[in-house]
Image (cartoon, rainbow, N blue to C red):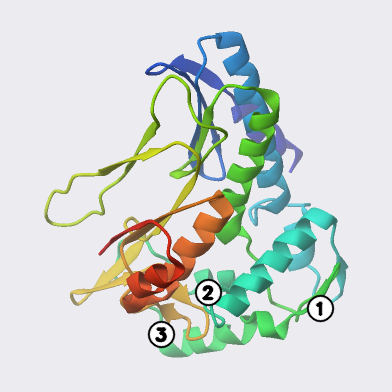
Amino acid sequence: MVAALADREAARSVSVEAGQDCLVGHFDAMASPCEILIESDDRGEAARLAQIAATEAWRIEDKFSRYRTGNVVAQINGSRGKPVEVDEETASLLDFAATLHTLSDGCFDITSGVLREVWTFDGGDRIPAPEAVRDILQRVGWDKVRWQRPVLTMRPGMQVDLGGIGKEYAVDRVAGKLAKATTHSALVNFGGDLAVTRAPRKRDAWRVGIEPVTGNQPQKGTILEIRTGALATSGDARRFLLKDGVRYGHILDPRSGWPVEGAPRSVTVAADTCTQAGMLSTLAMLKGYTAEAFLDGERVRYWCRR
């Protein structure tokens, strides 16, 4: 474990390069390429800000990744039915997850990660047996969890996975730190989930692209302009199964254990914060065929691709 930690720390690095009327800091975190676009020509300041961003992103990754040992998620998942008292930050994320579970009528569920034991979305055609899905559902369900802040108690064999909200949370945390650290506008982009710290001065807006969904026909991406606020994208363009001509996207309904029927290939939402945008894009995906109607009802700007 010590060797693995040393290898991970050695692999972590931050670089800065010139962009178009800005400097760009690069690093990797949460299985995503991350970049910080800074409206400045001071490379030293850009390096300082990029390091601030990377340090916070890595902190959140180390604390909440289900792939790490010794963190709070590992403690919860290894509790074997015993109560676990969590810190304030973790409690706030659990509260948010509980709210999403209620708003989605149980479609968003941080205990559903164990379904990956029977589902592997690698573009192949391996569909799990219905009985295998049915068996594992016994270990899924936020309603089976006892959450009385700050104490969480789960049944043996159950797990939590905060990956569905962690990256958007990290984007907002980093944007907040950069807003305090510099008066320059900065755009935080973690694998397509992004936020702007303040309106830019050297341009009308930051220009960002939404990648096209994959398919038989070539498609053009969409270019968006953003001055303030945030964007988040949910989709299954790269994670799916295909069997007998039927495409199974990786967005699973935790109530049935099977992919959501009629889910869009991609949903991008604009909101004040990345966490809000991520919440809405995720809930839209879980709505399946009625994703657009849901977003229309929320009166938000969105881009939905099927």
Q: In the picture shown, does residue 225 fall above or below 122?
A: above
Could you tell me the amino acid type at mark 3? Ala
Task: Decide: is 188 above or below 267.
Answer: above
Callout 1: SS: loop
The answer to whether 274 appears left or right of 161 in the picture is left
> Residue at horizontal 52%, vertical 79%?
254
Disc 1 residue type (three-letter)? Gly
Identified at 65% across, 31% down, the residue is: 179
Q: Residues within 10 Å of mark 3 (few under 14, many from 20)?
A: few
* Labels 1, 3: front one: 1
Q: Which residue is mark 3?
A: 129
Nearer the N terminus, badge 1 or badge 3? Answer: 1
Evaluate whether residue 11 shows in this view.
yes
In the drawing, does residue 110 fall left or right of residue 81?
Answer: left
For the residues marked 1 and 3, what is the alpha-carbon distance in whole angstroms? Answer: 28 Å
How far apart in space, not on screen, are marks 1 and 2 (Cα)?
A: 19 Å
Determine the image quadrant of residue 150: bottom right
Q: Earlier in the sequence, mark 1 or mark 2?
A: 1
Q: Tell me the mark number nearer the camera, choosing from 2 and 3.
A: 2
* Screen quadrant of the N terminus: top right
**Could you tell whether 151 is left or right of 249 in the image?**
right
Instruction: Give, as a three-letter code, the residue at label 2.
Output: Leu
Above or below residue 143? Residue 270 is above
Q: Which mark is residue 81?
A: 1
The answer to whether residue 247 is above or below residue 75 is below
Circle 2 sits on which residue? Answer: 115
